[in-house]
Every structure is written in structure tokens, then in C-alpha cells.
Image (cartoon, helix red, strand yellow):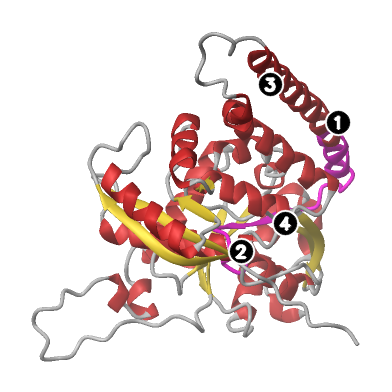
Amino acid sequence: MLEKKTIEHEKAVLIGIINREQNENKVTEYLDELEFLTYTAGGEVLKRFVQRMDVTNPKTLIGSGKMEEVETFVRDNEIGSVIFDDELTPAQQRNIEKILRCKIVDRTSLILDIFAQRAQTSYARTQVELAQYEYLLPRLTGLWTHLERQRGGIGMRGPGETEIETDRRIVRDRISLLKKKLLKIDRQMETQRGNRGALVRVALVGYTNVGKSTLMNVISKSEVFAENKLFATLDTTVRKVVIGNLPFLLSDTVGFIRKLPTQLVESFKSTLDEVREADLLLHVVDISHPQFEEHIESVNKILGEIDSADKNTIMVFNKIDKYEHAEIDDDDLTTERTGRHFTIADWKQTWMQRVGDKALFISALNKENLDEFRKRVYDEVRDIHVTRFPYNNFLYPENLDEY
């Protein structure tokens, strides 16, 4: 008889900081996302610690009083990981590890860990490994504490320094090797893209967990892995799609996130070539998320970093089936009406009105408004195709209903 296997989640606590750049509401939202990241990585959050400070402690990021509070909770509850929302310097990470005596993880290393779990192909694994080594290199000193190299003095010179320098050299050599391997794979992928001919290329982009893979499955009738977790998709998937009788290539790319580690942006730039070389972008947005406008800004920022901000783009507002707005009573004169009180009809009258017919509202899961979506994508792809092949104009009529 097979035994039931129970998955034990690692106990974790989260730490965030309120300052001039991020108020209490913003920190709460960031920690919500960090908790989802922790859950995706296999952790269970027992408590959150938040400290208000304009100037962070250069040694431990948070103040000594808050650190004592965290230390007591970690000791009493056998916490395995303490996760900081902000990126820690190598020195801060070492100092905090000495005090708390458990794993210290920042947002960057947490995202890198999830990417390592999710990477399936050799190409994705190589990119993640490169990002991990580049993150690890300045932090190697913390891995050799058994040599007590930090104390210095008589009898403490020599072997420790030699060993850490040897280790750094090994990591640098590995980084160099991975970069050469990626260049080779890049050339192979470039050849693959070239072999696809002159078909119009459409790329799905957006924040992580907004439903890109679900939409990909619905449009292309394929079975791309989709899950309600962050970064369910790492490997770019390309499928040939036909709407009416018009063929084009649709690619599903890795999701973006706020504070995306620079190492990942660099190492995944070759994967993002699918976005850079696309003729049309479908920017998928989870309209049911309270901060979807900030998600749009984050995605646009990263698109700017890969020189894709000016591409022809359709905004696809997904998950309209999950959208709920807060109600205000007619006799309530104190509550200020904000975006969370807007219905979808109200949102359409805001800045979305300027987007015009480049804004679509759908539910990929429940297949709502997909006919309108197909028609809009068909029109855009047709315009690009007819411009590229004017003699094919008669093959693709303007009215999709003819098919």
C-alpha cells in the first residue's frame, strides 16, 4: 500500500520597511506579493514584521529593537527562513545571519529560487544558473565562516584568503562558460526564428500570473502549463495560430514582476528576443488585481529596458469574471470614491478611453468576449500581413465573419 506523501512547507517570516518611497499600504501590497512568492517557492508565512524608518540601518537594514523582536519569534517558532522584501547587501546578509542563525533570503534570491524550480529546458536552466552565479559572486565571503576569516590577526591569514579567492575564480570561470553557452544557444534560436519565414509574430506579455498561458491555450488550442502561481511559465512557447484563414505565430513569454532582479533581466534578454522581434504585443492585465495599474507600469518599464516600449500593443484586460468593486452607500458622505469603487464600465471611461479599440476586456478561463478578441487580433495581424505582402490582400478580407 502506498503511503500518502505530505508536503511540509518551510516556516518563514517576512520583513518590510515603510519609508518615504513606500507607505504602509504599498508595503502591505508588496508583502502580499512576497507571501505569494514564498508560497510558490514552498514556504509558509507565519508572521510579518514591518518597521517604519526613513534611513535604514547599514548593518542590518532594520533597527536593533525590531531585530530582537524578530530573533525571539524565530527562536520560539523554529523558523527556517527570514525573507526581506528589499534587496540586502552581502554585508547585511552576513550580519543578519549571525544574529538570527537561520536562512536569510531577500526578494531577489527568492525569485531566483522560484526560477530555478520552474526552469524545464536546458536553455532556461542555463539562464537561471547564470543569474544565480552573478548574484552569488559578491556574497561568497559568507560561505566560508568556518575559517573565521573575518577575525584576522595572527594565524588567521593565508588559507582562508586562498580558499575564498579560489572559489571566486571557479565562479567567474563558470559565469564565463555559461555566457559562451548562451551565445551558442542564442545563435541556434536566431536560426530557428529565421526559419519561421515571414509570418506575423504576436507575443503575449504581462505581469506574472495574469493568465497569459491560459489565454495561449484557448487561442492556440494547445496545452501550455498554466497554474495559479507566480512564474508558472519560464520557457518561451511558440505556436502557429490561424484565425479565419490568416496564420500567425503566437509566443507565450516569462511574466514580469516589480523589482525584477537585474541579473534575471540580463540573463533572460535572449528569451525576451521573442518580445523584441514581435510585430504585435498583447499586453495581458489582471483587472481583478487591486493594483493592476502599477502592474502595467512595471511591465512598461521592463519593455522599455528591452527596447520594446514603442511596439504596436493591444491591452487585454483579463479575469473580468473575478472583478469586484467596493460599494458606497448613497447616504455615505465621508468615503472618498477611488478606483476600487469603479465598475468595469467606469474604468472604460477613465484613461482606458484613450486606448480606444486597443483595449479589450475578456475572461480567458470562462471564454468571455473571445469573439471580440479574435476579431481585434485578426484585424491587427491582417494589417501587418497585407503591408508585408500587398499581393495577398484579396486572400484576407476585412470581415472575419466571412469565414
Q: Residue at x 74, y 27 (%)?
A: 175
Q: Return the disc, 2 or 3, that comes first in the chain's sequence.
A: 2
Comparing 277 with 100, the one in front is 100
Q: Nearer the viewer, mark 4 or mark 1?
A: 4
Q: Residue 198 in magenta?
A: yes
Which residue is the site of mark 1? 184
Query: Which image quadrant is residue 21 in?
Result: top left
Mark 2–mark 3 distance (CA, rounded to whole Å) = 31 Å
Q: Residue at x 25, y 37 (%)?
A: 55
Amino acid residing under circle 3:
Arg
Q: Return the disc, 1 or 2, that comes first in the chain's sequence.
A: 2
Mark 1–mark 2 distance (CA, rounded to whole Å) = 32 Å
Q: Residue at x 43, y 50 (%)?
A: 85
Q: Report the number of numbered marks.
A: 4
Answer few, some or many: residues within 10 Å of disc 1's Cα (few below 14, many 20 plus, some between 14 and 19). few
Q: Quadrant of the N terminus?
A: bottom right
Which residue is the site of mark 2? 40
State if disc 3 and disc 1 touch (CB < 8 Å).
no
Amino acid residing under circle 1:
Lys
Report the span colored magenta. Answer: 186-211
Secondary structure state at the residue bearing disc 1 = helix
Q: Return the disc, 1 or 3, that comes first in the chain's sequence.
A: 3
Which residue is the site of mark 4? 118
- The tag on residue 168 is 3
Q: Nearer the viewer, mark 4 or mark 3?
A: 3
Secondary structure state at the residue bearing disc 4 = helix
Mark 2–mark 4 distance (CA, rounded to whole Å) = 10 Å
Q: Residue 380 in magenta?
A: no
Res 186 seen here: yes
Q: Nearer the viewer, mark 1 or mark 2?
A: 2
